[in-house]
Image: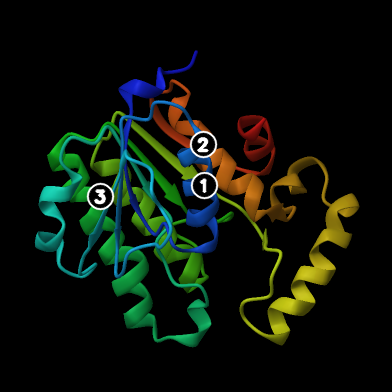
């Protein structure tokens, strides 16, 4: 079953990033979304849709956006560090965990029913990987907030049309698609996903009915984005 789009009001954190941009583009094409509220460090240019509101906020200060999350039914969070290896562990926790959790708490207080998070494949609060453990801890804390519905999108490599992070990413973007035939069965979740498919899935999933916690991976992205 699907929800009527005119029943949905969305608040987004991270709409200017690669995945957020794709999700926002799809949201703007969906008919009758009641309202789209974009929160960020600076406005996104060239958005003229009448149902869009943009607010410049301090992501580290929840009081700067408290009032802007009101009257939203759904939250989409694609906010986070593009290259975690380039910053300290303390800063990574501050951005990818603390700021996201603060946003989620404000959403919960405001009555948001459905929270969507861009996470990663392999996340676990008991992982030996600092990155995966931090993301896993975040998800456990989000579960404790008891949203009516919590959707975590868990991609492996996100395939972007442009290289944003130098030689390492350039090599990865070339090699990862070649691994697809080797990633089958339980390994399918490690297949690379085009950023456009992931963004479409995050946007269209808000119109699907659901309850409780869902961890969405490679096959789900393609199923939802159709």
Q: Label 1 belongs to which residue?
A: 25
Q: Label 2 belongs to which residue?
A: 29
**For the residues bearing labels 2 and 1, Cβ distance under 8 angstroms:** yes
Where residue 205 appears, x then y in whole percent?
50, 32
- The residue sitting at 52% across, 47% down in the picture is 25
Q: Left of 50 or right of it: where is 2?
A: right
Q: Is residue 222 above or below residue 208?
A: below
Where residue 184 sits, quadrant-wise, is top right
- The residue sitting at 71% across, 82% down in the picture is 168
Where residue 174 appears, x then y in whole percent?
83, 70
Where residue 136 appears, x then y in whole percent?
43, 56
**Structural distance between the alpha carbons of marks 1 and 3:** 23 Å
Nearer to the camera, 216 or 76: 76
* Label 3: which secondary element: helix
**For the residues bearing labels 2 and 3, Cβ distance under 8 angstroms:** no
* Label 2: which secondary element: helix
* Label 1: which secondary element: helix
Q: Label 3 belongs to which residue?
A: 104
**Structural distance between the alpha carbons of marks 2 and 3:** 26 Å
- The residue sitting at 44% across, 62% down in the picture is 16
């Amino acid at each position: 079953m699907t929800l009527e789009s005119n029943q949905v009001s969305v608040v987004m954190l991270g709409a200017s990033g690669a995945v957020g941009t794709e999700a926002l583009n799809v949201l703007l094409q969906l008919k009758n979304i009641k309202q789209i509220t974009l929160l960020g460090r600076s406005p996104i240019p060239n958005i003229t849709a009448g149902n869009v509101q943009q607010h410049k906020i301090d992501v580290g200060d929840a009081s700067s956006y408290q009032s802007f999350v009101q009257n939203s039914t759904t939250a989409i969070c694609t906010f986070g560090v593009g290259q975690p290896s380039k910053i300290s562990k303390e800063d990574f926790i501050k951005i990818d965990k603390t700021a996201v959790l603060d946003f989620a708490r404000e959403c919960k207080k405001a009555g948001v029913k459905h929270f969507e998070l861009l996470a990663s494949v392999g996340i676990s609060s008991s992982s030996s990987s600092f990155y995966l453990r931090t993301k896993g801890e975040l998800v456990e804390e989000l579960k404790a907030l008891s949203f009516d519905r919590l959707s975590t999108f868990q991609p492996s490599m996100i395939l972007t049309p442009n290289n944003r992070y130098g030689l390492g990413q350039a090599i990865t973007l070339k090699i990862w698609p070649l691994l697809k035939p080797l990633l089958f069965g339980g390994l399918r979740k490690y297949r690379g996903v085009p950023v456009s498919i992931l963004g479409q899935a995050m946007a269209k999933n808000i119109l699907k009915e659901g309850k409780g916690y869902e961890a969405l991976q490679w096959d789900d992205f393609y199923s939802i984005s159709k």
